[in-house]
């Protein structure tokens, strides 16, 4: 029996790896929590750690062991357990192995350790994988996936560690060169192998009631485990792993529910989660996993009369005289006192456009600038107005969108309607959006969703990139951006070149002294230019500065967008079902489409 409270002596091995050798705050928070229940902590670094990271790890542990990044965390656990002599290991009541794939503790580890002290066990963990009647890895000796304690956090007790079975398991562990081998060598088989020898095991979060619902409760029902079972940790991969994994077993709501619970009902600083995710993950994955689509009310004032402290500006570029009226009518929805900056290509355009905004001069300071006709609406933003953008906290950028290359002009008009309705449909909506940026310091960019209608349907596939990936990649390299970028993952970008942005999120973009010569002269091609690259680089600039990007829709436009998605889904499903012989669950349907 283990003593509750502070009497139990523990040795903890924590495995850390980061591709860039950076130690995030979430690592220190975890180790600080682990320190409260452990007498000694050894951090085993797989790979490299920079000098700042080494200093941080040294502050929150007793020793840091740096080793080559081979053998995954399982081999690093082995190194940590064998790093001290058998006699010294057995001077501890418990040994803990855990790794940096977790955020926490959301609640103090002491609560969990005290509860488990009441249980007569040889080893235990936080959660168990419920098992599966097959071997998805091809490395499991049993030919199937048995129920097992998940290896991201395991605890071994003194009497168990004193056995030859425990010692030989680690001393005789084979070399591991693949992730699948790491599963087959230890995680999937350790629990059953030891249970078959008569050793007793258990878990803190006994989610056996979920065995008919999921194989992996912490992955599929994280909010329930956090709230109802007082689980102290959250798996990182829940926030970024392929969305098909979540969507194949649920409605995809798990990560968002868990994040909101941690943010709103615990004292754990979610900023540490954002810091890590934004540095290491693809924004496209985060957007889907965290359901980063904001539906904002156009009629109900959610600010409760609070005045914003964010200095805000509206930036408009107008080329088409006939669209100036529309721009002015929507611009009238900006709250009084917000500054306007309007660019036009020449003096003649200025003369014809300016009268539409005359009525707004009573409530807004309006600055007009001549931009020339180069770089469409993008160059006026990053060249003509580069001296003013960073003087504001928040900017709404719009323009007179007219798609001339598509002969039925209603198609382009519908895209403009989408943008305006999702960015500034009413004054109440605008106030609510500004409040979003005020309340969430990690929010960097809000962009309308990609259009779905007419020829824009391919945009929901690879059309977000089109032929512009390399140009955007080159732009990112020029700006020194370090965040992940992948042609297979869509940019969360304002493809209509209209968006709300926290200007700090664009510091890297405006650090480059853009010149008009960097933009092509008219006529401009449909892809591959500096304008197309900048249009897609915005969310990557924001992420590199530590901000996330999301879609935004007004409550009066969202039904239209949802009906469009529903129409597309139903008609595509029906057509493919007729071709391939019937309706199927989405994963099977997708697989058949891909391989038929």
Image (tube, grey):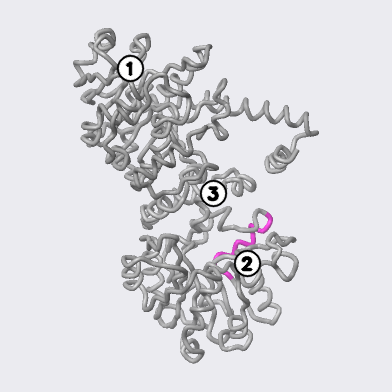
Between discs 3 and 2, the one toward the N terminus: 2
Q: Which residues are magenta?
A: 203-212
Q: CA distance from mark 3 to mark 1?
A: 43 Å
Q: Along the line of sight, which residue is nearer the eye, 518 or 125?
A: 518
Q: Which mark, residue 183?
A: 2
In the image, residue 483 sits, relative to residue 191, either above or below, namely: above
Residue neighbourhood size for the residue with mark 3, other residues' Cα within 10 Å, grouped as few (<14), some (14–19), many (≥20): many
Quarter of the image where the C terminus is located: top right
* Crowd band around label 2 with a 10 angstrom C-alpha radius: few (<14), some (14–19), many (20+): many
Residue topped by disc 3: 254
Q: Mark 3 against mark 2, which lies toward the viewer?
A: 2
The residue lying furthest to the bottom in this view is: 87
Q: Residue at x 48, y 72 (%)?
A: 68
Q: Position of residue 539 (x, y in %)?
A: 40, 39
Q: What type of secondary structure mainly makes up the magenta span? A: loop
Residue drawn 48% across the image and 30% down it: 449
Q: Position of residue 442 (x, y in %)?
A: 35, 45
Dots 3 and 1: beta carbons under 8 Å? no
Badge 1: few (under 14), some or many (20 or more) residues near its Cα, within 10 Å?
many
The tag earlier along the polypeptide, 1 or 2, is 2
Depth check, front residue: 594 or 336: 594
Expressed as whole percent of the image width and height from the top left, the position of residue 131 reads 68, 63
Label 3, label 2: how many angstroms apart (C-alpha)? 24 Å
Q: Quadrant of residue 357?
A: top left
- Is residue 216 located in the magenta-colored stretch of the structure? no
Q: Is residue 230 above or below residue 564?
A: below
Question: Secondary structure beneath disc 3?
Answer: helix
Residue at 31%, 42% in the rendered image: 508
Residue at the disc numbered 1: 318
Say above or below: 534 vs 426: below
- Distance in Å between CA atoms under marks 1 and 2: 59 Å
């Amino acid at each position: 029996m283990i003593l509750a409270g502070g009497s139990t002596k523990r040795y903890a091995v924590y495995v850390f790896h980061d591709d860039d050798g950076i130690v995030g705050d979430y690592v220190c928070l975890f180790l600080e929590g682990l320190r409260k229940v452990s007498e000694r902590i050894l951090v085993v670094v797989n790979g490299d750690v920079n000098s700042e990271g080494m200093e941080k790890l040294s502050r929150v542990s007793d020793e840091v062991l740096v080793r080559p990044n081979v053998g995954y965390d399982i081999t690093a656990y082995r190194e940590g357990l064998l790093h001290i002599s058998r006699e010294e290991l057995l001077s501890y009541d418990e040994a803990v192995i855990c790794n940096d794939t977790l955020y926490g503790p959301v609640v103090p580890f002491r609560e969990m350790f005290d509860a488990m002290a009441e249980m007569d066990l040889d080893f235990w963990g936080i959660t168990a994988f419920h098992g599966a009647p097959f071997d998805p890895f091809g490395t499991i000796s049993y030919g199937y996936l048995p129920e097992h304690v998940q290896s991201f956090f395991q605890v071994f007790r003194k009497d168990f560690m004193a056995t030859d079975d425990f010692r030989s398991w680690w001393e005789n562990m084979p070399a591991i060169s693949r992730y699948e081998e790491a599963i087959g060598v230890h995680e999937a088989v350790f629990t059953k192998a030891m249970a078959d020898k008569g050793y007793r095991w258990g878990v803190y979060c006994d989610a056996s009631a979920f065995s008919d619902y999921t194989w992996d409760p912490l992955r599929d029902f994280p909010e329930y485990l956090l709230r109802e079972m007082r689980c102290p940790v959250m798996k990182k991969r829940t926030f970024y792993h392929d969305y098909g994994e979540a969507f194949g077993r649920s409605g995809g709501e798990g990560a968002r529910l868990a994040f909101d619970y941690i943010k709103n009902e615990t004292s754990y600083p979610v900023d540490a989660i954002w810091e890590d995710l934004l540095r290491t993950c693809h924004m496209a994955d985060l957007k889907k996993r965290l359901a980063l689509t904001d539906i904002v009310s156009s009629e109900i004032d959610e600010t409760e009369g609070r005045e914003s402290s964010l200095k805000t500006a509206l930036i408009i570029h107008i080329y088409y005289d006939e669209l100036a009226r529309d721009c002015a009518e929507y611009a009238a929805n900006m709250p009084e006192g917000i500054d306007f900056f309007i660019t036009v290509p020449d003096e003649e355009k200025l003369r014809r456009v300016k009268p539409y905004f005359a009525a707004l001069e009573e409530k807004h300071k309006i600055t007009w600038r001549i931009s020339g006709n180069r770089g469409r609406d993008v160059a006026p933003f990053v060249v003509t107005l580069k001296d003013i953008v960073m003087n504001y906290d928040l900017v709404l950028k719009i323009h007179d969108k007219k798609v001339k290359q598509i002969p039925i002009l209603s198609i382009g008009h519908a895209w403009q309607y989408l943008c305006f309705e999702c960015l500034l449909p009413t004054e109440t909506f605008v106030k609510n959006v500004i409040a979003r940026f005020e309340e969430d310091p990690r929010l960097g960019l809000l962009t309308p969703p990609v259009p779905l209608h007419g020829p824009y349907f391919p945009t929901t596939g690879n059309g977000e990139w089109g032929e512009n990936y390399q140009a955007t990649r080159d732009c990112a390299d020029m700006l020194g951006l370090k965040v992940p970028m992948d042609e297979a993952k869509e940019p969360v970008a304002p493809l209509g070149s209209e968006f709300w942005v926290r200007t700090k999120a664009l510091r890297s973009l405006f650090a480059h002294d853009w010149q008009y010569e960097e933009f092509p002269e008219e006529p401009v091609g449909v892809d591959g230019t500096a304008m197309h690259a900048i249009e897609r680089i915005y969310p990557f600039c924001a992420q590199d500065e530590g901000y996330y990007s999301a879609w935004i829709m007004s409550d009066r436009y969202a039904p239209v967008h949802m009906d469009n998605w529903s129409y597309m889904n139903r008609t595509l499903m029906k057509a493919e079902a007729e071709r391939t012989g019937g309706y199927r669950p989405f994963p099977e349907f997708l697989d058949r489409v891909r391989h038929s």
